[in-house]
Image (tube, rainbow, N blue to C red):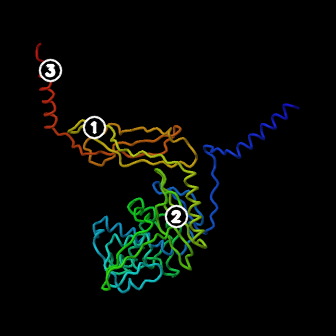
Amino acid sequence: MMKKRVTTWVLLLMLITAELCPVKIQGAVQPAPEISAPGAVLMEPSTGTVLYEKNGEEQRSPASITKIMTLLLIFEALEDGQITLEEEAVTSAYAKSMGGSQVFLEEGEKQTVETLIKCIVVASGNDASVVMAEHLAGSEEEFVKRMNEKAGELGMIHTQFEDCCGLTDSEEHYTTASDVAIVSRELITRFPRILEYSSIWMENIIHRTAQGEKEFCLTNTNKLIRSYEGCVGLKTGSTSVAKYCVSAVAQRGEMTLLAVVMGAPDAKVRFKDAAALLDYGFGKCNLYLDENRKNPDPVPIKGGVKAEVACRYTGEFRYLDTEGKNLSQIEKKIVYMKNLQAPVKKGDIVGEAQYLLDGKVVGKTDIVAAKSVKKAGLWDYIKHIRKRMIKGDAYSTDR
């Protein structure tokens, strides 16, 4: 009888301790967040892994998160050298006429591309978006064609744009939470500098017009920048049709997460849902990163003018774990191609780095030739033999 009582008290004490001091168990299933908005997606952008989805393919009006595509095309133009951050764009009468969220640009006013980027991503300026659309494509209509072409290239099959800023309430202007995640991922991974702009909380710009100069304060529409640890962007949006939307990006350590919320009933729910998604992702995920900065050893090569070829990794390796595995146990194994024959061109695959966890390959990174090695000809063999003979004579002197 005494033994039963002791056992009961021990069990009760264990339950109380567990309640007061919860322990995170490796591999434990984390409950999915409760999301009020009708559409949502959570993604780890470096791998493209979707961690949560709610009606991700349901078409909705995007409001100002439309501007994510506008920003992507601006940064592509910067990359291609079509424009520079320092050059100026002129505000047209049409751009000035934009309603909704704006930075109150005047007709004829000039602003640098960099300032207009800030106006778009921080203050969600519809007028600034149209200025850049006209500057890049001549007209908003032509720019929207490019937006739709880019959406097709990215596989955003449930998206169609009718303007560059999301001000329209047209039923023909739509996208999905999944497609917003796709374009957001493209923007932040290819052009991470956007996060420097989207994380600005407040900044003044100067309007210079015929009436003189005056300051205007840009204030970030994304309140998560101040309220959520690690939030660095990206874009909000709201209209009477779209309700409240956000594409939120947060970084903690090496981990970056992207949460898209669409159709929330109010701004408070929009940000609450985004924060819940990000909390879920940071609690669920572990990221293994090998930056592969040190080049692998040269690879032996047959029949070439050189006996080996220098090589390099094609990039870093990332592995996302959502099951609580011990990522410190990941092993890296270099596997080269056997009997590699010349000629070898720079960039040719010569092997791979394999990453193993619990004896299973969880990912690979290609290893390529860092330089070209030509096939050896007859004269190359003669020079090689002669060099060996000279070297042999040097070491055959009687002592």
Please name the residue that numbered disc 2 is placed on: 224
Q: Which amino acid does label 3 sit on?
A: Tyr
Mark toward the start of the polypeptide (3 vs 1): 1
Labels in figure, total: 3
Mark toward the start of the polypeptide (2 vs 1): 2
**Residue at 49%, 42% in the rendered image:** 361
Residue furthest right as drawn: 1
As measured in the structure, the alpha-carbon distance from the residue carrying label 2 to the one carrying label 3 is: 74 Å
Of residue 323 and residue 256, the one placed in the foreground of this image is 256
Q: Which image quadrant is residue 269 in?
A: bottom right
Relative to 273, residue 214 above or below: below
**Residue at 53%, 58% in the rendered image:** 50
- Judged from the image, the secondary structure of the residue bearing numbered disc 3 is loop
Please name the residue that numbered disc 1 is placed on: 301
Please name the residue that numbered disc 3 is placed on: 395
Residue 29 x %, y %: 63, 49
Of residue 106 and residue 207, the one placed in the foreground of this image is 207
Q: Which of marks 2 and 1 is in front?
A: 2
- Judged from the image, the secondary structure of the residue bearing numbered disc 2 is helix
Residue 173 x %, y %: 49, 78
- Judged from the image, the secondary structure of the residue bearing numbered disc 1 is loop
